[in-house]
Amino acid sequence: MELFNVYPIFDINIVKGEGSYVWDEKGNKYLDFYGGHAVISIGHSHPKYVERISDQVSKLGFYSNSVINELQKEVAKKLGKISGYNDYSLFLVNSGAEANENALKLASFYNGRTKVISFSKAFHGRTSLAVEVTDNPAIIAPINNNENVSFLPLNNINVFEEEIKKRDVCAVIIEGIQGVGGIKIPNNDFLQAVRKLCDETNTVLILDEIQSGYGRSGKFFAHQYAKIKPDLITVAKGIGNGFPLSGVLIHPKFNPTYGMLGTTFGGNHLACAAALAVLEVMEEESLVDNSKDMGEYLMNQLKDLPQIKEVRGRGLMIGLEFDTPIKDLRKKLLHEKKVFTGISGEKVLRLLPPLSITKNEADLFVKSLRETITEK
Ligand SMILES: Cc1ncc(COP(=O)(O)O)c(C=O)c1O
């Protein structure tokens, strides 16, 4: 059997990772400024993570959600404390799309409505509701297109107000920082106005913090820069440092009923061990602060490099917009300098390194990029 060929891949076989580095089967060492697509939060193969998961799997890898799972309760408690959302509750699932799927369902259960406001360039995943609120017609299958969604321009409060004032909108879904869309940040005043208008119209505000959350922005959640509290927050990626796990943080106004939501694998023992290791390491190593400091340092170093039109982002979620397409530059960085990076569209290089990077690693990245640009 062959693999279903949907990924345009690099011809590199990664077999090992440690901290901010990965190695291929030939022994080549790469600096990972892509974090496996914003997934690696505490660094590859962190000893505490390895120990926690190994210990858990030797005792119990999985049992179903039909019994008490103390590890889930521990994750909820710790996440509530670290994120500042103690009074919210947590529902655990397996992937980012699934978290958004459940958040949108909860919103619709709550106010009985079906329309959703999303934003241009938004990406929320590939399952039915998640892809329907994603602004990319190429990945929306006809069966997903139920015409429930309005895509509005980001940061345009007048257009937003006009739409939401119709009072028939179930939910607004917005990324803390748009990732796939090219590191676009919703303004603080825009988020504050959205919060206020959602309250006035009984619309549920969903913050998709799947890429921008868990410290990546230099605060635990990117929306915390705007000092607002969403009704639902979705998390994934960094939450398990690569172990598939995601969640929805749920405001106390939502009342759970048995069977309302459910999953076989979500929140299993092994996944929770991974999630706990991540939260413990984040706290012990002050990774949210490191993300903020390293992000500021990097952005300062990068802003004077030639050919870069704009450096934008927060913490370690950084976009470098170039004047010209950067496909070749990214390839050169990878094959010649052995540095992984991400891309958005044709001209934005996306940096999503582990939150644990050091100043030396930041310097190494800047040096590699500078040389690649000037040697071009
Ligand atoms: C903001 C955002 N939401 C949702 C998703 C979907 O997550 P997953 O691929 O785990 O379903 C992604 C993935 O890139 C994302 O960046």
Image (cartoon, rainbow, N blue to C red):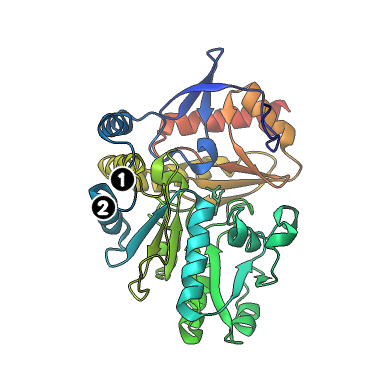
Three-letter code for the amino acid on which mark 1 is drawn: Leu
Q: What is the count of numbered marks?
A: 2
Q: Position of residue 253 (x, y in %)?
A: 35, 76
Q: Is residue 146 above or below residue 141?
A: below
Q: Residue 40: name its quadrant.
A: top left
- Identify the residue shown where x is 39% and y is 70%: 229
Query: CA–CA distance between discs 1 and 2?
Result: 7 Å
Give the quadrant of the C terminus.
top right
Q: Which of the labelled discs sits on residue 78, or is there none?
A: 2
Relative side of 124 to 268, left or right: right
Three-letter code for the amino acid on which mark 2 is drawn: Lys
- Identify the residue shown where x is 51% and y is 85%: 201
Relative side of 222 to 173, left or right: left
Q: Are marks 1 and 2 in contact (CB under 8 Å)?
A: yes
Q: Which of the labelled discs sits on residue 279, or is there none?
A: 1
Q: Secondary structure at mark 1?
A: helix
Few, some or many C-alpha atoms within 10 Å of disc 1 (few <14, some 14-19, many ≥20)?
Answer: many
For ligand 1, tell me if the residue under mark 2 lies within 8 Å. no
Q: Residue furthest top?
A: 26
Q: Position of residue 114 (x, y in %)?
A: 59, 76
